Amino acid sequence: MSAPNILAARNAVAVYFFMHGVIWGSWAAQIPLAKERLDTGPGLFGLALLSLATGAIIAMPLAGALINRLGSRLVTVLAGVLFSLLYLGPVTAPDVTIFMLAGFVFGMVTGSMDVAMNAHGIAVERRIGKPVMSFLHGAFSLGGLAGALVGGVLVQQFGSLAQGVMVSLFSAGVLLYVRPMLLPASVDKGLSATHFGWPTRASIGLGILCFLALMGEGAIIDWGGIFLRQKFELDAGTAALGYALFSGGMAISRFAGDWLRARFGAVRLVRWSAWMMAFAMAGALLAPHPAVAIAVLIFTGIGIGNVAPVLFSGGGRLEPHAPGRGIAAVTTLGYAGFLAGPPAIGIAAEAVGLAGALWIVAIAGVAIALAARAARAADQD
């Protein structure tokens, strides 16, 4: 593939990451309103959010098998468009039962899209011959920033339903528009004779670190706005600003992450990032003023930003003849943290309060820093 075409493919898959972030950022503005609409406590609401995790975790290994059979291009497009449209499910659910059913289906397409677009990103990275995964995840964070800012304004001005419809249709349209620029299905279709495979010990190790990193990211998406709203009595739009700055911090670190990884190596990048994640999260929880808490979240985002992209890249290199399957093994554990971690935070909040439960995120950062050597797989040829 010529240089202009491979750059177009990189930019196209970056758009998929960006729109994925837009949906999640828009969801951050919806979460406090959903909790109030369902009229539940933090424990029950946490269990309701578990439906998203269940759907995603079931779908991820299956997505890895589909990528080997069909190629990451087709799975990325189909899952991306469905992800955009099914966003309306949890946004409009009138009670907990419907919320959980809609969340389960939404979680399935979320997990499938995550695996597929990361597999496609690995294919692009291999053809360019230099790291690009942090750039792609930076696009996700930039989308999260845009989704939280614009989504918060749309909720305030037009209400939750109108916001959901506008974001859903816009996202689906953009993803279909850039579809022709993706790499052909042949780049990773049928690389392995077997479509499904159990994770190896090495991929489980990367997956556990991914679980901790994405648990922190998911906790801030799902509970950051609620924490700010409860502690400082902020409105929904202002509370969403915390996630917006957090996403901005992730974007800053990820757009620098490929250069940092090439310069210092994956292990040191993950270790330094994890320590910043831990200390910045602690600072946000101890902040006495809302402006300070919101501002400190940008450093939490800078810290957490590069951990998952490096680990995903490592997962794709552990199985060079089935990168989709390798990424699926890591992301299944990683997104178990992203989606199952926040419900666990809600359950813990019943016992120690939400601020106390969010200390789990800071502790996770310490654990990642101490085990960062496992990230060396990302530097393998």
Image (cartoon, rainbow, N blue to C red):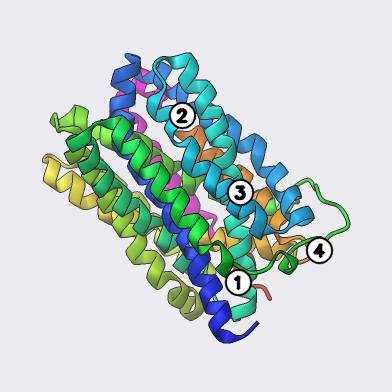
Which SS class for mark 1? helix
Check disc 4 and report the residue beneath it. 191
In the rendering, at what x and y percent does residue 353 appear? Answer: 30, 23
Gap in Å between the C-alphas at discs 4 and 3?
A: 21 Å
Q: Which numbered disc covers residue 124?
A: 1
Amino acid type for the residue under numbered disc 2 = Gly
Which SS class for mark 3? helix
In front of the other: label 3 or label 1?
Answer: 3
Residue in view at x 59 percent, y 46 percent: 79
Q: Earlier in the sequence, mark 4 or mark 1?
A: 1
- Characterize the local packing of mark 4: few (<14), some (14-19) or many (20 or more) Cα atoms within 10 angstroms: some
Whether residue 308 is visible here, answered yes or no, is no
Q: Earlier in the sequence, mark 3 or mark 2?
A: 3
Check disc 2 and report the residue beneath it. 89
Whether residue 161 is visible here, answered yes or no, is yes
Tell whether position 369 is magenta.
yes
In front of the other: label 4 or label 3?
Answer: 3
Tell whether position 127 is magenta.
no
Look at the picture and state if 258 lies above or below 351.
below
For the record, the magenta segment spans: 345-374
Amino acid type for the residue under numbered disc 4 = Leu
Amino acid type for the residue under numbered disc 1 = Val
In the rendering, at what x and y percent does residue 234 appear? Answer: 14, 33
Q: Earlier in the sequence, mark 3 or mark 1?
A: 3
Q: Which numbered disc covers residue 78?
A: 3
Q: Earlier in the sequence, mark 4 or mark 2?
A: 2
